[in-house]
């Protein structure tokens, strides 16, 4: 008689493939699902009674920035407690490797708005391979899948220069992407509204994507604009996939700014048409009508040339500051102008690092300007200087109808676009977007159960087997014998998010257990402190 490490009894099994739930027991042994079936006569070291509860594959967060915060808290509380068992990190062109020690200070400043207040990320690696080995030794409560960030690669090769790369610099970038892919990266990510990605052209991105394609990687893109430039930005992402012969993932798909609401009707048609032509394009989304990013992103592209320190110098220059004001007021063709798309009153400060400015967290820029008796642009510039650029913002920019249209589309999968936090310690400050804590419970509880926008089975598929298939994870994302036991046990009647914009540091309800590689990480709602995660490496299949 086989003895199991864990048996889950009497569960409603949501297999991750979208099939209707079925009643079954699960037997776990040596980290994997050893048996799906009746196990009433079998013994185990641990038995979990899942009567009236659902068990599903662990959620795969296909869009995360947690590589910048895991070093400060490997328990990744905000991820585990919403059922995430795998984090795809290095999104939006922002990865922590590779590192060119000559340009390390530029990379540190590039990452600084994401870091806990007063903290610095100690980079004990240079290559992507060295980073993965470092993370492996550090440990984490969930699995880590890495993307190599185009912005990070560009910094390593040519800093923050606003120009095309030389032939030698482009070859250097291609070698860095190839090294990352050979080491196990799952793809190349871009952040084309951020410096230095904003300085790149389509031809550069095609060349680098071709390298990732040689290793069966995916092109993940925060596209060049999600407001007035949305349609052109989606066209560019599709064109890169077509020209480079690479699978495309459009990150956190949305239509930002009231003038652009409804454009998702067209973008979804564009992606469907591209698939008919043979372009493998899909997208992810978080279930909220507000976005979040760094406050300095409000400034025009030229203001970022040379890195964050140069940006701050320009803010101190009255002439250059006035030029920034005019560009924000009038816009620049092809630039994602958040102020123009949303308005000052829709942009809220999420986090600052100085104690004196903590009172502005949760206030919008119009309110802050009124308190300071200044105009909004001056208030923005002064705040950026006071915070040395280390501030984040939430933009209330999207329409719920667009959110729902995108969410129920068959090409959508779920992602948080968050970095891991916790209500305590250095990661417990500020007012982060509630998606940091509530993304998956909100999809399952509000949109699937309460509003019936999709079935529970479909919501689970979009969170498990769909992203697993996109990444090429052939032994995760489905409840099947022989697959790794990454599992979530939740109450389908109680699961719901609790985090709000006003009070974001709140764990969700209704998730009882989380199992990672066969080890219990969340038990009856309490973290076990198990660092059960693995660093997952993409299986390299070159096209040569």
Image: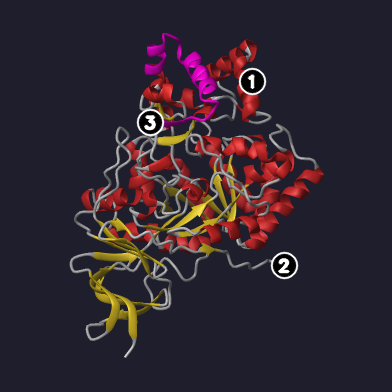
Determine if the magenta segment contains residue 275: no
Query: Can residue 343 be seen at all in this image of the molecule?
Result: no
Real-space CA distance between mark 1 and mark 2, rounded to the nearest whole angstrom: 47 Å
Q: Nearer the viewer, residue 35 or 41?
A: 41
- Could you tell me residue 404's position as x and y percent? 33, 44
Quarter of the figure with residue 43: bottom left
Front position in the image: 12 or 204: 12
Mark 1 — residue?
313
* Number of the front mark, 3 or 2: 3
Which of marks 2 and 1 precedes in the sequence? Answer: 1
Q: How is the image coloured?
A: secondary structure
Extreme-top residue of the structure: 373
The local crowd at label 1, few if under 14, some if 14 to 19, many if 20 or more residues have their Cα within 10 Å, is few
Q: Quadrant of residue 513?
A: bottom left
The magenta stretch is 367-396
Q: Quadrant of the N terminus?
A: bottom left
């Amino acid at each position: 008689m086989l003895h199991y490490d864990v048996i889950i009894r009497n569960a409603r099994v949501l297999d991750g493939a979208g099939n209707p739930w079925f009643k079954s027991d699960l037997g776990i042994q040596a980290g994997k699902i050893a048996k799906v079936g009746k196990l009433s006569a079998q013994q185990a070291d641990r038995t979990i009674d899942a009567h009236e509860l659902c068990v599903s594959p662990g959620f795969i967060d296909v869009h995360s920035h947690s590589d910048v915060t895991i070093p400060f808290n490997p328990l990744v509380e905000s991820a585990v407690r919403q059922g995430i068992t795998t984090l795809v990190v290095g999104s939006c062109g922002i990865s922590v490797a590779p590192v060119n020690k000559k340009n390390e200070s530029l990379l540190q400043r590039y990452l600084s708005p994401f870091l806990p207040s007063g903290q610095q990320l100690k980079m004990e690696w240079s290559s992507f391979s060295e980073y993965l080995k470092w993370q492996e030794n550090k440990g984490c409560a969930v699995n880590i899948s890495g993307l190599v960030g185009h912005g990070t690669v560009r910094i390593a090769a040519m800093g923050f220069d606003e120009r095309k790369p030389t032939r030698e610099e482009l070859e250097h970038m291609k070698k860095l992407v190839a090294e990352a892919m050979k080491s196990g990266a799952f793809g190349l990510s871009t952040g084309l509204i951020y410096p230095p990605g904003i300085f790149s052209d389509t031809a550069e991105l095609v060349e680098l994507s071709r390298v990732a394609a040689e290793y069966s990687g995916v092109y993940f893109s925060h596209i060049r604009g999600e407001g007035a430039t949305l349609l052109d930005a989606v066209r560019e992402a599709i064109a890169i996939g077509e020209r480079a012969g690479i699978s495309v993932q459009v990150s956190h798909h949305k239509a930002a700014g009231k003038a652009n609401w409804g454009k998702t009707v067209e973008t979804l048609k564009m992606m469907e048409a591209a698939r008919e032509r043979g372009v493998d394009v899909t997208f992810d989304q978080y279930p909220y009508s507000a976005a979040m990013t760094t406050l300095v992103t409000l400034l025009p592209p030229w203001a970022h040339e040379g890195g964050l320190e140069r940006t701050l110098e320009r803010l101190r220059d009255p002439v250059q500051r006035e030029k920034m004001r005019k560009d924000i007021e009038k816009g620049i063709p092809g630039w994602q102008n958040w102020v123009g798309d949303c308005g000052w009153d829709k942009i809220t400060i999420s986090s600052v690092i100085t104690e004196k400015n903590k009172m502005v967290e949760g206030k919008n820029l119009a309110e802050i300007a009124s308190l300071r008796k200044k105009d909004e642009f001056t208030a923005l510039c002064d705040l950026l200087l006071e915070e040395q650029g280390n501030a984040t913002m939430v933009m209330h920019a999207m329409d719920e109808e667009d959110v729902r249209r995108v969410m129920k589309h068959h090409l959508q999968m779920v992602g948080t676009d968050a970095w891991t936090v916790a209500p305590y310690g250095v990661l417990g400050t500020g007012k982060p977007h509630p998606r940091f804590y509530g993304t998956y419970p909100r999809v399952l509880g509000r949109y699937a159960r309460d509003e019936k926008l999709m079935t529970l089975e479909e919501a689970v598929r979009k969170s498990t087997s769909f992203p697993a298939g996109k990444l090429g994870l052939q032994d995760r994302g489905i409840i099947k014998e022989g697959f790794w036991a990454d599992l979530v046990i939740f109450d389908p009647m109680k699961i719901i998010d609790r985090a709000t914009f006003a009070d974001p540091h709140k764990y969700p309800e209704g998730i009882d257990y989380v199992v990672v590689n066969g080890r219990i990480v969340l038990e009856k709602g309490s973290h076990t402190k198990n660092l059960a995660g693995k660093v997952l490496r993409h299986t390299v299949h070159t096209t040569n």
